[in-house]
Image: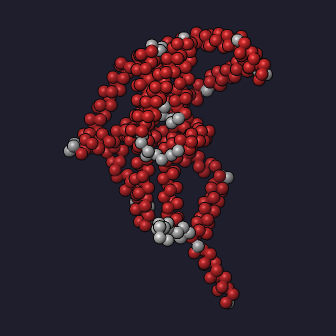
Amino acid sequence: MNRQREWTDRFRIFLNNKFVLFLLVLLLIGLNVLVFSKVPHIFEPLRVLAKTVLLPIILTGIVYYLTNPLVDYLERRKIKRAYSILALYLAIICVVTLIVVAVVPLIRDQVQGLIDNIPYYSAQIQVQFEDLIGSEIFNQIQQTLGLDTTALMNDLSNRATDLLKNAWSGIGGFIGALTEVVLAIITVPFILFYLLKDGKKLPHFILGFVPTKFRGQSFRVMVEMHRQISSYIRGQIIVSFCIGALLFIGYLIIGLNYSLVLAIIAACTSIVPYLGPAIAITPALIVASVTSPIMLLKMIVVWTVVQLIEGKFISPQIMGKTMHIHPITIIFVILTAGNLFGIVGIILAVPGYAVLKVIATHLFRYFKTRSGLYEEERTVSANE
């Protein structure tokens, strides 16, 4: 009897250990994930639901973080929130109409011209490449590295052919994806209206499902997540717009063809930190190099100046230090998210990492205070 009571006491002490209990909870979660992964059809409705609502929610969230400060400002000016939202919608309709009437035809003409000149650009690049192959310097490099240019060109041709075949076969998938995007855009205004009108009630609604003991900590986590996401979305979009505007002005000054299209491409790709500008410079390099060597030099100068202005003045003032994420970490996060989730992962990599970082930081602080495994740091005086 005493031996049984002794084992019971030991087992109770074992379970009262918070670290052991934490490991047991993780083990149970892992077992549940393992069991449900063996029956994936259970998650099929959830996957379809997530696929359906994810894009509208993402688009609505982006527009919400851009427009909510204006609605809050009008509300502080004693204008009812519903009237502020209505005025905002009217302003957006006017801006969209102006863009469709004035800017879209210009973009269409430049895109059509760029598409029509693709054969010319391809021929010019091929001529320049053949001139480079015939040079003595390239021949020396080829002999040193053992390159077979014929095999290399054949391989590139085969890859291009395969790419075209895959693109042709993927037209159906592209049309389906385009339909989903159009439907998502149509639903954004309806979701955005209710989010702008009742968005402040959402955190308290979510806290209603959280145990009372954890509501204070959960609210602080949501506030910090909201601050991180809002600062990143607003800052990155403003920075991207500034980059596009500066490049458009620079391209107009040097007389680069298709300046508006190239600037829009640069603005869109600059949403991805660090890697976006490297992608955006490629089409501009092609157009400038085919035009003339002087134009290529001018384009590089414009791009360098814009990047210096963005790095030294625009980003520090707009983005600041709110993210507290090292650039190397951002690059690895973007590459990993791109491999896992494609283009959507690349776009959402940084804000998603910021949210996970906030959650992990607060969980660690909670574990640190509750476990008793960490002693509080104390300042050592000079007399000790």
The foreground one among 281 and 358 is: 281
Residue 85 visible? yes
Residue 154 visible? no
- Residue 175 at x, y percent in the picture: 54, 27
Which colour assignment does the render follow? secondary structure
Vertical placement of 277 versus 299: above or below? below
Left or right: 268 as drawn, with respect to 88:
right
Residue at (44% x, 32% y) in the render: 310
Residue at (41% x, 25% y) in the render: 246
- Residue 383 at x, y percent in the picture: 47, 70
The foreground one among 172 and 61 is: 61
Q: Residue furthest bottom?
A: 1
- Residue 99 at x, y percent in the picture: 36, 23
- Residue 316 at x, y percent in the picture: 42, 39
The foreground one among 168 and 81 is: 81
Residue at (54% x, 67% y) in the render: 374
Vertical placement of 16 versus 171: above or below? below
